[in-house]
Image (cartoon, grey):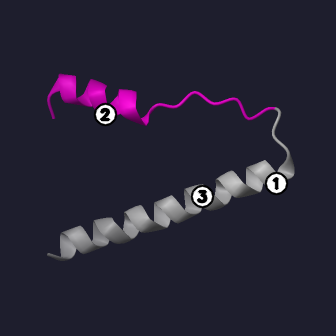
Amino acid sequence: MPEEMKKMVCHHLSINSNFDNMDEKMTTYIDEQFVTVYKQWKSDLHKFFEL
């Protein structure tokens, strides 16, 4: 992968978040969202490589 592409991917994947002041409900919600997105991504990945 070209270096420019690596930098672009890193930039899009990086995130700067402050989770210090979150309550339990917010943390639970974010965890559930991450799990949902991850499961969908994993399913899509498997489907892609089955073709």
Question: The residue tagged with tag 2: helix, strand or loop?
Answer: helix
Q: Which range is magenta? A: 1-20
Question: The residue tagged with tag 1: helix, strand or loop?
Answer: helix
32 in relation to 9, above or below: below
The residue sitting at 37% across, 71% down in the picture is 43
The residue sitting at 70% across, 29% down in the picture is 18
| Amino acid at dot 1 | Lys
Q: Is 36 part of what is drawn in magenta?
A: no
Residue holding disc 3 = 33
- Measured in 3D between alpha carbons, the distance from the residue under mark 2 to the one under mark 3, in whole angstroms, is 22 Å
| Amino acid at dot 3 | Gln
On-image quarter of the C terminus: bottom left
Disc number placed over residue 16 in the picture, else none: none
Disc number placed over residue 25 in the picture, else none: 1
- Residue 17 place in picture, x, y as percent: 63, 30
The residue sitting at 81% across, 40% down in the picture is 22
- Measured in 3D between alpha carbons, the distance from the residue under mark 3 to the one under mark 1, in whole angstroms, is 12 Å
Say whether disc 3 or disc 1 marks the residue closer to the N-terminus. 1
Q: Left or right: 9 with respect to 21?
A: left
> Is the residue marked by circle 1 packed among few (<14), some (14-19), or many (20+) residues within 10 Å?
few
- Residue 19 place in picture, x, y as percent: 73, 35
| Amino acid at dot 2 | Val
Say whether disc 2 or disc 3 marks the residue closer to the N-terminus. 2
Residue holding disc 2 = 9
13 in relation to 41, above or below: above
